[in-house]
Image (cartoon, coloured by chain):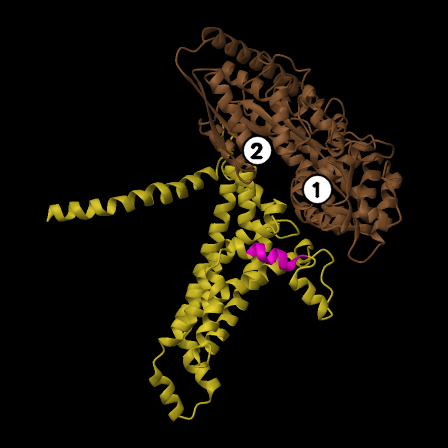
Amino acid sequence: MKTRHLAGNLFTLPWILTLLFFWLFPLLYSLYLGFTDYRLLKPDWTWVGLANYAALVSDRDFLDSLLNTFIFVFGTIPVTTVVALILALLIERRFPGRTLFRSGFFMPSITSMVVIALVFTNLYSRGGYIYLLTRMIGLSPPENGFLLSDKTALLSVMAMDVWMSVGYYMLLFLAGLKAIPDELYESADVAGASPFRKFRSITLPLLKPVALFIIVINTIKSFQVFIEIFVMTKGRYDTSTAVYFIYETGLNQFRFGYASAAAYVLFLIIAAFSILQFSLLRQRRLY
Amino acid sequence: MFASDSYCRDMKKYSHTAVITAVAAALLIMLACTGQDKPEGPVTLEWWQFWTDPAVKPVIEEMVTEYEAAHPGITVNLTDLTWANGHEKIVVAFSSGTAPDIVELGSDWIGEFAAAGQLAPLNDMIEDTARLVGWKPAVYNDTIYACPWILGTRVLFINRSLMEQAGLTDLDIPVNWDKFREVCYKIDSIGDDIYGFGSNAAEKHRLYKKFLPFFWSAGGNLFSEDFKYVTIAGNIGYKALMLYKELSDSCSMIDTQRRLEDAFLAGKIGIIISGDWLLRRIKNEKPGLDFVTTLMPGPVYPGSSFMGGEYLAISGSCPYPGEAMAFIEYIINAENQIRFAKANYSASPSNKEAARDEFFKEDINLQTFIKQINISKMPPAIPEWVYIENIIEEKLEQVLFEDAPPAQSLYDAKLEIEKLIHDK
């Protein structure tokens, strides 16, 4: 028995050690750093208590980046979720070329974000296809392209993000739709329910766990938006987000203490939203 | 808020401490050198550098091989860095005590590493400073911390075909601001997708390098001589900014530097400010482009420009500073700088003797760069420079792209920079 335990412990040891050294230790160490004025090139760092957190509250750059993050999160999640659901409902029906559409919608999700961001940077620029298309239909795009304007840069990044992630969430919704027993729809047919009634009373309630999962992971992902900003705008034109601020502060200015504090503020915001979403979507019975 | 007396006292105290530290460090290095003039065993020098271009890297390797052959017992290990994350790697290496013996640094990084005590002072090791140009960013608190290697400045690139289409000749090549403005407007009037000037969008580390030449050319200085006050907000700063804004608003394509250069190569922009890398691009990608380079214009001819460059520094923890310095002397000698310039088609050697070589005289565009270097300016070696440039860029962006009042924005920049240097 003891040998079995020993073997089990030995097998799990690599994972436990990895967890301790590469996950738990950095997590706790960065929490500690958030209370110091640690800079990479400054050996004599000191404990500053809550000074970093107090400074963050009045740091205009941080507050702007938080605001942009909230705009990104609340602008993309509802659109992504609704479009993904609509696509899933359409794709679920049998029609010629269904597999092609499903693959097409999913393709952006398995493509490198950097590649997509570079392609869209070109599409959004003056002379790019999206720029020319908007002019062709009579709209007036910003003179220097979508990414070089305060008014459109963040919106353009958000639109690209929706386009990129909607296919993945569509697949999750499709899996949820497949799991709904056909008997429920057959019973509803017998009772003479309209398609909309079936959707509202069967499909939507039974997709609730999938929707919850999608909203939670999308919230976490969206709060951490970084690569798009890094590649497309470098935080210029009012597009700096919380993670980009942390990157700039930590890896360009090397103010690790301050950056760690900002990271924990973001962590608390994400945790609060995740808890809120779980409690809201779990409590209400929709059917 | 200007500097207080206590600030001045502190500054004096710090500069005394810095001088004493530098002298002590120099003495220690001298003692160390006398103790190990010829290290007993083999010496391995680690060199981190950024030149990975297929045309240049073999030349660097060749120089290293030749040096090793001429100095038995010395091995030089090359490690390549990239501009994307090289700075991060160097910072991490210094802070974790794993810095290389010799490291190539961008000119605006030297102050940061020197202030952190990570670089070896070189005053007593450099044979002759007069043979090189570009010392300003290498000197921190009166101590030399790096050797200028490859410098870089910016000049005007002008599309001659577009000038011709606009009814202009070589006699119209801008020599002052008035002519510059006139040529930009005339080229811009050729057609809808032709632009007179290429103006930089809000792009970090680039926009301020385009504005400062206008400011410097008009006789401006960023700081007062005692370095206590910022002098960007006066009449000169205002005039320079208004000209840049006028060009930007009226006759420019506004885009990132890379895309502006693409447009210049495509014949869409009449005048662009760029460095010698654009010469390489034209040579490789558009050899038939009819263009000319000229010195930056000012209110009067010629104007000043921004200069940066690549520097070679020795880590403070290097066990063989004498050998490292000897290797740096070898790399920056005239012969090797010419070899490097030929491979890279670059125009900015730090070595004056190299700059007089026939290679540069034969090429009119390289000559423009050589001339511009002698009248260009460099930012000071201060660890806060990265924040200062950020403040300048932020205010420029507000004026250029958000129509903020120029005078107020420059004054705000002055206040923010003064606060930064006084609070340090």
**Magenta region: which residues?**
A117-125
Q: Earlier in the sequence, mark 2 or mark 1?
A: 2
- Residue highlighted by disc 1: B207
Q: Colour of chain B?
A: brown
The image position of residue A271, as x and y in percent, is 45, 55
- Residue highlighted by disc 2: B56
Q: Secondary structure at mark 1?
A: helix
Dividing the picture into quadrants, the one containing residue B304 is top right
Q: Amino acid at mark 2?
A: Val
Q: Please give the label number shown on residue B389.
A: none
> What is the magenta segment's predominant secondary structure?
helix
Q: Secondary structure at mark 2?
A: loop
Foreground tag (2 vs 1) = 2
The foreground one among B127 and A40 is B127
* Label 2 crowd (10 A; few <14 / some 14-19 / many >=20): some
The image position of residue A171, as x and y in percent, is 43, 69
